[in-house]
Image: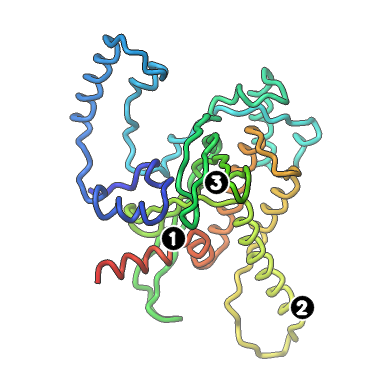
Amino acid sequence: MAVTAPTYVLEESLSSQKLWKNTAGTRPPQPVEERAFYEKMWTQNFEKSQVKYGIPGEVLTATSPICLSPFADGNFRTELSNYNITEESKQSDDPAEAHLMDRMSAQNSDFQDTAIEPHPRHIVVNKTVKGPADSSMTVLVRGDNVFGTTVSKSFALASDKGGPIEGIDTVNVSIASYRVVESKNHGKYAQYLVIYREGSIRDTIGVWKRYSDFKDLSRKVTQQHESCVSVLANMSPLAITEENEVEHLPNAITSWRLLQKRQRWFRCLDAGYLSLKVFLLERFLHDILFESTSPTLLREFVGADSVDTDSQNSDE
């Protein structure tokens, strides 16, 4: 039985994820009963131990979630941050946004607007990791996507254009968490862990993306939309023209505009703001998946094509 990579593996580079997939990922999962037996033994040892680990006891003795995939909705937390929601921002015509604002407002009444520390899922890390182009960077803090969820869509697989359908390809996408990092060249900035799966559960990959990467993706979506509108505007009702394969994604464009409406200036890294931003970014990806006729846009965004190419070369 195949399982997807653990979250700590999906947070690493694509090359490290590929290494895990070809080594540890080939091992069968530990039976649930056996895992529960050893975790009970560890819990008893920790309770008797007098060592000061510097970690809360509930963390040391926490049991492993019985889940084969990070796409399960139960993996995401429900606690919220100290993001200050004004009365004006609560009023929205969008039901999803209005629901989000109500929940965030209800749970943030005890927090001060300027404080970051009370955020229950804003964890201080201060760990040096490998960055792009073999550079190093420091992970300062990280947090879960408290409203995160995974959506999936199936696409028909055809051998040739217009040919018979040979199968179904299912694609899942979500944003599991965010983190604030610091590097010598770029200073402090936020990254978002995009979890993408196409096909088998073992083909799940995780990629850290910056806001600028999402911005580049939005340009592609907008350019395709404008191209489609331009063609329709200049088309004669009696003209016979060849149909171009252009994606029309109006909901994705709306989601991106909503994100821009909520955007703050000067690279805001407040925990509450990032909690809202990661939700809106995920919603943007969800709309792209829902409205697309093929997973090409998302595949290119996460770099899944390069992973498949590397896997084929290694198999040969």
Q: Closer to the camera, 154 or 184?
A: 184
Specify which label sits upstream in the sequence, 1 or 2.
Answer: 1
Q: Position of residue 305 (x, y in %)?
A: 43, 66
Q: Amino acid at mark 1?
A: Ser
Q: Which residue was labeled with disc 1?
A: 154
* Amino acid on which disc 3 is placed: Tyr
Is 165 located above or below residue 92 in the figure?
A: below
Compared to residue 237, the image places residue 191 above or below, namely above
Task: Look at discs 2 and 3 and give the one toward the viewer.
Answer: 3
Task: Residue 304 in the image: state x and y as whole percent.
Answer: 43, 62
- The reply, left or right, for residue 146 in relation to residue 107 is left
Q: What residue is at 66 percent from the left and 23 percent from the top?
A: 108
Q: Earlier in the sequence, mark 3 or mark 1?
A: 1
Q: Residue at x 65, y 70 (%)?
A: 224
- As drawn, which residue projects farthest toward the front? 184
The quarter of the picture where the C terminus appears is bottom left
Give the class, few, some or many, for how many residues have Cα within 10 Å of label 1's Cα (few <14, many ≥20). Answer: some
State the SS at label 3.
strand
Q: CA distance from mark 2 to mark 3?
A: 38 Å
Tell me the residue that label 3 is attached to: 192
Q: Neighbour class for label 2 at 10 Å: few (<14), some, many (≥20)?
A: few
Q: Which mark is residue 233?
A: 2
**Alpha carbon distance from label 3 to label 1:** 25 Å
